[in-house]
Image (tube, rainbow, N blue to C red):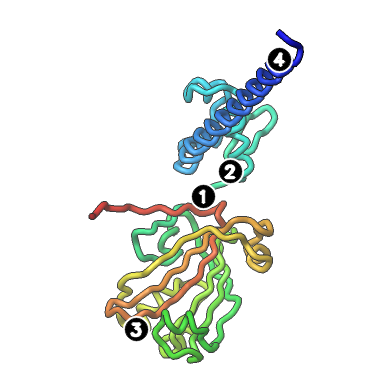
Amino acid sequence: MPPSDRIRDHAGQGATTVAAHRARRRLRADQARQLADLLRHQLLAGGFPDGALPHETVLATDYRATRNTVRQALDLLRAEGLVDRLPGVGTVVVAQKYPHGLDRLMGLAETLHEHGTVTNEVRTTVPAPAPAPVAERLRVQPGTDVLYIERLRRLNGLPLSLDLTYIPLDIGTALLGADLENTDVFRLLETITGQRLGHAEITLEAVNADTHSAAVLEAPRGAAVLMLERLTHLADGRPIDLEFIRFRGDRITMSGLLHRSL
């Protein structure tokens, strides 16, 4: 074989080796992500009641994975702030996410009552002209005053969400003297109107925390937060509460029950 052919043949073998190596790394990364998803579900569901995960060798056996894959999966969970590795102890759960259902219309204190006390730091309560998108959703004339409320909500003292709320002023005026620090707005609205809340339209997406939101929520700047936009209606159909809620994504998990219909 001519030298030039041998060089090309050797180069081709090298390229094949590099491609195979990259494929193995990609496969291991995929497997680590899959394992991290399974372990995350377990630890959030209380699957490790003593607070410690099994040893890496046990996890590798249970999930038929390599030790390297297990380590990568645990690294992913550690990066999320869910676990940490303690010398002489192993991998332990260091954070808890709290469940927030999406299939029932409830205030935060009602939703999380089993997990502790929700308190509200009322940062702003002021009548303000409704921006056009707010006016449209609440069915008021643009520029009409609405009540704007900004609250930092804590669970057992930990910052959980930053809520921006808009309410028509004919209803919102009664909230100005209400106990917003210790009572869900939903309960107050039902008391003021004498009606039950009926339904809500929601949109949920992940956004990066702006400087202000990150500081208030005590989250890293640019960290991902869950943005829940919710327009709540009274039982008679009137929209009365438009909220933009930023949840710390490392402290809340959203869930719901869906039924298939075609």
Q: Which mark is residue 82?
A: 2
Which residue occupies the foreground of this view, 231 or 195? 231
The earlier-in-sequence mark between 2 and 1 is: 2
Q: Earlier in the sequence, mark 2 or mark 3?
A: 2
Q: Earlier in the sequence, mark 3 or mark 1?
A: 1
The residue to which callout 1 is attached is: 97
Q: Position of residue 126 (x, y in %)?
A: 56, 86
Does the CB distance between marks 2 and 3 fall below 8 Å? no
Q: How far is the residue under mark 4 from the one under mark 2?
A: 54 Å
Q: Are marks 1 and 4 in contact (CB under 8 Å)?
A: no
Q: Residue at x 40, y 52 (%)?
A: 255
Q: Secondary structure at mark 3?
A: helix
Q: Residue at x 49, y 87 (%)?
A: 146
* Element assignment for label 4: helix
Disc 2, SS? loop
Label number found at residue 5: 4
Proximity of marks 2 and 1: CB atoms separated by less than 8 Å: yes
Q: Mark 3 or mark 4: which comes first in sequence?
A: 4
Label 1 is placed on what type of residue?
Answer: Lys
**Up-down relation of residue 247 to residue 185 (above or below):** above
Q: Which residue is mark 3?
A: 193
